[in-house]
């Protein structure tokens, strides 16, 4: 795998200090004066083999209650909007 090959860059200013928009090996070599190889080695997990470089990511779980609370929140917002529309649009207007 060659990093940065064909990556979209939105402007010419793609390096801002330690933050790079994309890794370009030519740019990296010229900036740091290092001789690096043209590919990246990625280690995949193999069953039965432990590797010190292997990352074990924990699964993110928000739970169903968080999703239900967000859904309830938006339902309440819609009822509030409807109430305010009816109150200020029709009831308050008829009082004046």
Image (cartoon, helix red, strand yellow):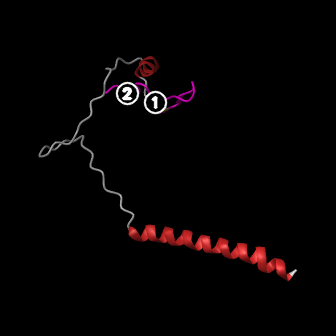
Magenta part of the chain = 1-19
Q: Is the residue marked by circle 2 packed among few (<14), some (14-19), or many (20+) residues within 10 Å?
A: few
Circle 1 residue: 22
Lateral position of residue 87 relative to residue 49, left or right: right
In the picture, the quarter occupied by the C terminus is: bottom right
Residue at image position (68%, 76%) is 83
Residue 79 at what x, y percent from top left?
A: 61, 74
Q: Kindly identify which numbered label has been placed on residue 44.
A: none
Lateral position of residue 95 relative to residue 10, left or right: right
Residue at image position (16%, 44%) is 50
Residue 88 at what x, y percent from top left?
A: 77, 75
Residue 13 at what x, y percent from top left?
A: 57, 26
Q: Secondary structure at mark 2?
A: loop
Nearest to the observer: residue 67 or residue 89: 89
The quadrant in which residue 47 appears is top left
Q: Is the residue marked by circle 1 packed among few (<14), some (14-19), or many (20+) residues within 10 Å?
A: some
Label 1, label 2: how far apart the Cα atoms are: 8 Å
Q: Is residue 72 magenta?
A: no
Disc 1 + disc 2, Cβ < 8 Å: yes
Residue 93 vs 13, above or below: the answer is below
Q: Is residue 5 magenta?
A: yes
For marks 1 and 2, the one nearer the N-term is 2
**Is the magenta region chiefly helix, strand or loop?**
loop
Circle 2 residue: 3
Residue 51 at what x, y percent from top left?
A: 19, 41
């Amino acid at each position: 795998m060659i990093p940065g090959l064909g990556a979209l860059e939105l402007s010419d200013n793609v390096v801002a200090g330690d933050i790079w928009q994309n890794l370009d090996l030519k740019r990296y070599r010229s900036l740091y004066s290092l001789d690096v190889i043209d590919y990246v080695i990625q280690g995949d997990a193999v069953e039965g083999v432990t590797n010190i470089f292997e990352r074990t990511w924990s699964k993110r779980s928000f739970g169903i209650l968080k999703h239900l609370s967000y859904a309830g929140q938006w339902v309440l917002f819609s009822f509030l909007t409807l109430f305010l529309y009816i109150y200020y649009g029709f009831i308050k207007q008829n009082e004046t």
